[in-house]
Image (spheres, rainbow, N blue to C red):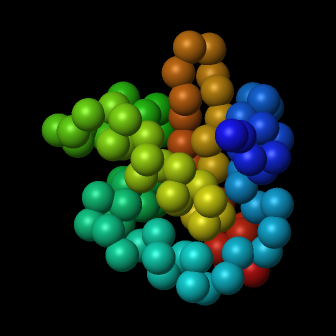
Amino acid sequence: MFHARFLFTRGTDDFRSTLKKNSIRDVMHALRDSVRIEIVFQLTAADGEVPCRCFGFDMPKLSLSHHFKVLREAGIVATRREGKEWVNSICKEDMEA
């Protein structure tokens, strides 16, 4: 069974999971994993967009996709499709609000 939220965000080229205002609880949950913290550090250091393949984690693609999903749902990371790959960036304006 698919959720309406998944169908809405998955069908667009540029999506953010900020359909609702995310709470501090969502953000703290997303940042309680060391892999997700490292993703945020790398995106912050890059000061722009970073393709998924450039993070250099030694883990299955499915696991990395899960971490990005958690960060997107918390409103921390935005992901969009560029050609055949996905690029990620920090949602600075959402985090500052």
Query: From where the camera sits, is residue 63 visible?
Result: yes
39, above or below 52, in the image? below
Q: Is residue 51 left or right of residue 91?
A: left
Residue at (33% x, 32% y) in the render: 61
Residue drawn at (62%, 59%) of the image: 73
Measured along the vertical axis of the image, is residue 91 above or below residue 46?
below
Q: Position of residue 20 (x, y in %)?
A: 81, 69
Q: Horizontally, is 54 left or right of 87 in the view? A: left
Relative to the observer, which residue lies in front, 3 or 49? 3
The quadrant holding residue 15 is top right
| Residue sitting farthest toward the top | 84
As drawn, which residue projects farthest toward the front?
Answer: 1
Residue at figure coordinates x 43%, y 40% from the top left: 65
The C terminus: image quadrant: bottom right
Extreme bottom residue here?
24
Given residues 87 and 58, the one toward you in this image is: 58
Q: How far across and down, in percent of the image, does residue 74 sit?
A: 60, 66
Quarter of the picture holding the N terminus: top right
Closer to us: 7 or 83: 7
In this orientation, does residue 47 appear? Answer: no
Q: Position of residue 4 (x, y in %)?
A: 81, 46
Quadrant hosting residue 25: bottom right
Picture coordinates of residue 33, whole percent (x, y): 32, 68
Left or right: residue 25 versus residue 6 is left
> As drawn, is 17 to the left or to the right of 65?
right
Q: How many marks?
A: 0
Q: Reply above or below: 27 against 74.
A: below
